[in-house]
Each structure stands twice: as C-alpha cells, then as structure tokens.
Amino acid sequence: MIHKKTYNAIEVKTKHGTVIVEGPVPSKEIANLHFHEDLKAFRVPEQQHKAIIEIAKLPEGRLIIVRDQTTIVGYTTFLYPDPLERWSKGNMENLIELGAIEVIPKYRGSGVGKSLLKVSMMDDAMNDYIIITTEYYWHWDLKGTGLNVWEYRKVMEKMMNAGGLEYYATDDPEISSHPANCLMARIGTRIDAESVQKFDQLRFMNRFMY
C-alpha cells in the first residue's frame, strides 16, 4: 500500500495567542523544533521528542503538530498498531492507530485538540484507512484537569468526534477492564466490505469462546 501524505495547516486563535496546527510534518522538521517540557504524559519530553521523530520516519507514520513559533506544544500520531496488540493480528495494511494525542495545559480548552483531529482528516488519503484509537482512563490527566473519569471520557469523545471517530464495541480484555475505557474508530469512505468484516473480527475475537 502506498501511504500518500498531503500537508495541511490551519491557524487557531487562543487566549494565549495564535498557534499553527499542521501536518503531516516530516521527521527532519520535527527534529529541528523545540519540544515543550510540559509534553510529558507518555514519557519524559526528550524521549518523547525522539519517539515522535521515529514515528514520522515510518512509511505509514503521520505526525500532526501544534506549533507556537518554533516550539511543539501539542501533537498527535498515526501509525500501525503495536505488534503485541490484537489490532495488528489481522495484518491489515489499511488499519492505522491514532497512537497518542497530547496538548500542553496552557492550550487546553482552546479547541486545539479538536483542531489536531480536523487537520489530520483534511488529507483525503485518510479515507483509505480504518483509523482506530484505544482510550484507557489510566492515560488521562485526571489530576491536572480536576475531571473525574466520566467527565474526561466525555471530553475525549467530543475531541475524537471532531475527527469523525465514533464509539465501537469490543471484547478486548484491556478495554473491557473498565467501563470508561473505549474503542473509537473512523472507517474511511473507500474502505471495502471485506476490510470492515476483518475489523469486526478483530473487535470480537472472544465471541467463539463461550
């Protein structure tokens, strides 16, 4: 499969000034930008900066960023699912995962997260994919936001809806381990029925066990 990537960008006005939401951004450009020290939800900022540079190098990898001048203040990643996860078991070339989304506290609540999703989907090539995201409450910044799990889940769903992702049921044990966890997906307009069927089989792998 050829992974076409078309760059798009929009300006987003916030109470702290205007930021650029853009991508997919190539790895060289990511490497030349400063990575904000408050981007630490997944690992220490320096390591996360290196991780997203590597993702941008992947044939299918996509990096959409929020840029304040020469500083990355938010980002989202798209890549093939982890080989250890069930979502890679179908060996589907046209299934990619929204792996991470993070915005520094200063710019939260300004519509920046939704803009990351909107810019991601502005590329018509995204209609060639089934895009999934797995939301786990233990990744959420409940302490920093002061929200409970259900309030945060609502925020996450609204943000994902901005990119056309919707809730999908699954029997995945990790997702099923807590009612706030969820699978969300966007099925591109050019996805064939066979791929949808394969995706459904991945969602319910335990149905024949009972």
Image: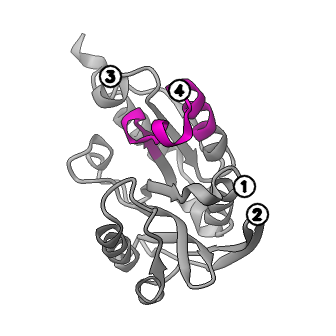
Q: Position of residue 107 (x, y in %)?
A: 64, 59
| CA distance separating discs 1 and 4 | 20 Å
Given residues 42 and 177, the one toward you in this image is 42
| Badge number at residue 14 | 2
Q: Mark 3 or mark 2: which is in front?
A: 2
Please, which residue is most extreme toward the top here?
210
Main secondary-structure element of the magenta-colored stretch: helix
At 36% from the left and 67% from the top, the residue drawn is 45
The mark nearer the N terminus, 3 or 4, is: 4
The mark nearer the N terminus, 1 or 4, is: 1
Q: Position of residue 91 (x, y in %)?
A: 29, 53
Given residues 152 and 38, the one toward you in this image is 38
Could you say whether the residue bearing mark 2 is in a helix, strand or loop? Answer: strand
Q: Could you tell whether 60 is left or right of 121 in the image?
A: left
Specify start and end residues of the magenta stretch as a single range: 133-157
Residue type marked 2: Thr
Q: Position of residue 206 (x, y in %)?
A: 27, 22
Contact, mark 1 vs mark 4 (Cβ under 8 Å)? no
Residue type marked 4: Asn
Contact, mark 1 vs mark 2 (Cβ under 8 Å)? yes
Contact, mark 1 vs mark 3 (Cβ under 8 Å)? no
Q: Is residue 14 above or below residue 183?
A: below
